Image (cartoon, rainbow, N blue to C red):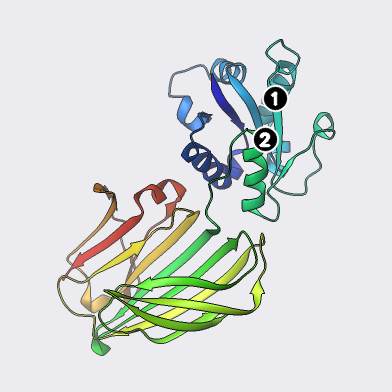
Amino acid sequence: MRDAFISYSRRDRDIVNQVTTDLRRAGLTVWLDEIEIVAGENIVEKIENGITSSKHFVAFLSEAYSRSAFAREELTSALMATLSPAKRSVIPVRLDNTPMPQLLRARKYCDFRESYLSGYQELARALGILSTLPDFRIWTECVHLRLVPELRLATWDYDREFEVSQECSELRVLKVYSDVPPVKVSVSPGDLTVKRLPGFFEVNAAYDPPLPGHRRLRQQVHYELNDVYGDPEDYWFYTIPTSFGSCNPSIIFPKYRAPTSFTVEFESDGFKSIKQAPDPIISESELVYQMHLDSRDAQFRRAFFRWEW
């Protein structure tokens, strides 16, 4: 018997995958079609078995869900199962402002429209577990590392969307693993301080007024490091937070200093995994190696981008 059957539209795959990942980390068994159905199997039969063999049916409602014939059939089947002696429960989850189906309007829903953290807390309670999410969650993050060899300079730009669970006035922005202090550091919003710690520098942002809780916020961070570029063993070490949603990191080389090799390696507690390095995007002056990481990659905690010249 599974704990939860996940009913959703493929257009909402990103947030559904994030919720599923968090539920599994909390110890629940979750039925998700991408994992449960393999090529050659009867889709309708597998879905029916998944619904009847799960304690809870979780419907991620959205405009895309309302347009999906498959999703509507799943919901109808689940509502019929609530009349059986086993009394399966149906839990609505709202992702946008699309009106709820008529048969669900009397039910209390979990609201993800404004806040992932509070929405997940409501869903966790409905499933009979405690929320184990961190107080700080990164939704999406775009990171650009640009190498400027003639200046022996490396610049980083972070553009992230995040959420905090409660009002706070200080937030650790990032750690800089370098023997030299970062220069030209800036953040918006907030005022920065840079702390020297053993082996690295830590950048902190203070906010006045405090950041509001349970609301999506956007933050941009820029910093530069001098005298760190040019050695063959140079690489970029990126830490993926446990609460990671998705990230699009890119490493930008000048075309006249293209690397001879480029690899991406993930590591967590001694376990390593190599991810296929992307082909570079080539322009007149630059080579850009661009990756897409999602919540499933967060299990590895650290990503190493390595190159040689």
Dividing the picture into quarters, in which one does residue 84 lie? Answer: top right
Dot placed on the residue nearer the N-terminal end, 1 or 2 = 1
Q: Are marks 1 and 2 in contact (CB under 8 Å)?
A: yes
Q: Which residue shows up at 46% across the image and 49% down it?
A: 295
How far apart are labels 1 and 2 at the CA level? 10 Å
The amino acid beneath tag 1 is Ser
Residue named by callout 1: 89
- Which one is in front, 288 or 291? 291
Task: Relative to 168, say whether 191 is above or below.
Answer: below
> SS for tag 1?
strand
Q: Which residue shows up at 24% across the image and 88% down it?
A: 150
Residue 285 percent coordinates (x, y): 32, 78
Task: Relative to 71, say whether 238 is above or below.
Answer: below
- Which one is in front, 98 or 179? 179
- Which one is in front, 297 or 205? 205
Dividing the picture into quarters, in which one does residue 197 lie? Answer: bottom left
Residue 274 percent coordinates (x, y): 25, 49
Residue 305 percent coordinates (x, y): 28, 62
Dividing the picture into quarters, in which one does residue 39 lie? Answer: top left
Task: Relative to 174, say whether 111 is above or below.
Answer: above
Is residue 284 among what the camera can see? no
Label ID, residue 126: 2
> SS for tag 2?
helix
The amino acid beneath tag 2 is Ala
Left or right: 51 as drawn, with respect to 230: right
Residue 101 percent coordinates (x, y): 80, 34
Q: Which residue shows up at 32% across the image and 58% down it?
A: 303
Is residue 91 among what the camera can see? yes
